[in-house]
Image (tube, rainbow, N blue to C red):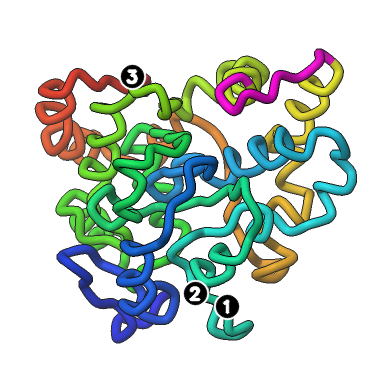
C-alpha cells in the first residue's frame, strides 16, 4: 500500500515520488535514444514482465542458462524507475549500457524520450483489456485506496502512470509503423509460441525450433512464477506479487454487472472511434 503523501501529479499524470521522482521524469524526456534500442512499452499490468522475459531470452538465446542468472529488471530496466535503497536511477544506468539496449517503460507517449519519435527504434507494445488490467492493478497495491475509490480513479485515469486509454491509443494508431510490433495480451495467452516467434522475427533474431520451444517453456506463467529472477522476488522479496494469476477473463469473478457496464460506458465508444477491440 502506498502512502497517499507520496503521490503527486507530473504534467497531469499521477506518480509515486519515491519511485518516479520529477527529476527522473524530466531526465527521461531528454534521454538520448539510439537507433538500435529496443523498447517494451505497456500500461502497467498488461504483460510487460512477461514480454521482458520473452524478449530477454530471445536476446540471450545463445546461452539461456546464463541469461536466466541475471534478475529481469537488470536485463531490461524500467526507464523511469528509481531504486532509492540501492541509489539507482535506471535512466542513468542505461546511459552507460552498450548497444543494443533493451528498455522498458509504462509512460504515456508524451512523457517518453522524445527522440523515440524521430529516431524510431524498435518498440514492442502490449495491450490488455481494461477490465483485467483494472483488477490486476488494484491487487498490485501501487495506491492507497479501497476498491471503490480505486475503481473510480482508474476510470478517470487518475492512477499511477495515468490513463489506460491514453497509453494504448498512440501505439494502436501507429501499429503499422515499421518499427512497432503491437501485441495483445490475450493473443499471447492463446498462442504463446506464436507470439515468441513474432517477437523474435521482429527483432531479426530467428530461432531454431528447439530454442523456440525452450523459450516458450521458460516464459510460461507457471515457470516464471517460480523463477526468482523472472518474478522479481530476488529484487523485492518473497512477498512480491508481480505475477499473480496470469489469466484472461479474471474480471468475470470480481466485477459486478454494474461495474462491468461502467467500464464499457467509459471506454467502448472511445475504443470504437479508433477501431480498437478487445477479446474479453
Q: Measured from the top left, where is residue 54 in percent x and y?
A: 66, 35
Decide: few, some or many residues near mark 1? Use Cα within 10 Å; few <14, some 14-19, many ≥20.
Answer: few
Q: Is residue 11 magenta?
A: no
Please tell me whether residue 159 is drawn above or below residue 34 in the rendered image: below
Quadrant in the picture for residue 165: top left
- Image: magenta residue range: 201-209
Q: Camera-side residue: 184 or 118?
A: 118
Q: Is residue 204 left or right of residue 187?
A: right
Residue at the spot 41% in from the left edge and 28% down from the top edge? 180
Query: Residue 248's x, y, as percent?
Result: 48, 30
* Alpha carbon separation for disc pair 2 and 3: 33 Å
Indicate the quadrant containing the C terminus: top left, top right, bottom left or bottom right: top left
Residue 82: give its label.
Answer: 2
Q: Is residue 56 left or right of residue 244?
A: right
Q: Which residue is mark 1?
A: 88
Task: Residue 21 in the image: state x and y as whole percent.
Answer: 36, 78
The part of the image, by quadrant, that contains residue 272 is top left
Q: Is residue 9 above or below residue 186?
A: below
Q: Secondary structure at mark 1?
A: strand
Label 2: how many Cα within 10 Å (few below 14, some 14–19, many 20+): many
Residue at 58% over, 19% down? 198
Determine which residue is flagged by label 3. 176
**Residue beneath the point at 44% across and 41% down:** 46
Q: Quadrant of residue 258?
A: top left
Along the line of sight, the residue nearer the viewer: 30 or 161:
30
Amino acid at each position: 500500500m502506498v502512502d497517499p503523501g507520496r503521490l503527486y501529479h507530473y504534467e497531469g499524470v499521477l506518480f509515486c515520488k519515491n519511485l518516479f521522482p520529477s527529476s527522473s521524469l524530466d531526465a527521461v524526456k531528454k534521454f538520448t535514444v539510439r537507433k538500435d534500442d529496443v523498447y517494451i512499452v505497456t500500461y502497467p499490468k498488461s504483460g510487460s514482465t512477461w514480454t521482458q522475459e520473452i524478449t530477454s531470452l530471445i536476446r540471450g538465446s545463445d546461452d539461456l542458462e546464463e541469461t536466466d542468472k541475471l534478475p529481469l529488471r537488470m536485463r531490461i530496466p524500467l526507464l523511469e524507475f528509481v531504486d532509492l535503497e540501492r541509489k539507482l536511477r535506471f535512466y542513468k544506468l542505461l546511459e552507460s549500457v552498450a548497444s543494443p539496449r533493451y528498455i522498458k517503460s509504462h509512460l504515456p507517449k508524451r512523457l517518453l524520450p522524445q527522440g523515440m519519435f524521430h529516431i524510431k527504434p524498435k518498440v514492442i507494445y502490449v495491450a490488455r483489456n481494461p477490465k483485467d488490467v483494472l483488477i490486476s492493478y488494484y491487487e498490485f497495491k501501487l495506491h492507497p485506496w479501497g476498491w471503490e475509490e480505486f475503481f473510480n480513479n482508474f476510470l478517470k485515469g487518475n492512477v499511477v502512470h495515468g490513463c489506460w486509454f491514453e497509453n494504448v491509443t498512440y501505439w494502436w494508431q501507429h501499429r503499422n509503423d515499421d518499427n512497432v510490433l503491437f501485441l495483445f495480451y490475450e493473443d499471447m495467452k492463446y498462442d504463446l509460441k506464436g507470439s515468441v516467434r513474432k517477437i523474435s522475427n521482429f527483432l531479426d533474431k530467428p530461432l531454431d525450433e528447439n530454442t523456440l520451444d525452450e523459450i516458450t517453456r521458460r516464459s510460461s506463467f507457471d515457470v516464471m512464477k517460480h523463477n526468482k529472477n523472472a518474478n522479481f522476488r530476488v529484487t523485492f522479496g518473497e512477498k512480491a506479487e508481480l505475477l499473480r494469476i496470469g489469466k484472461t477473463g479474471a474480471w468475470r469473478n470480481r466485477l459486478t454487472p454494474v461495474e462491468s457496464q461502467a467500464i464499457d460506458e467509459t471506454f467502448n465508444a472511445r475504443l470504437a472511434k479508433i477501431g480498437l477491440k478487445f477479446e474479453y
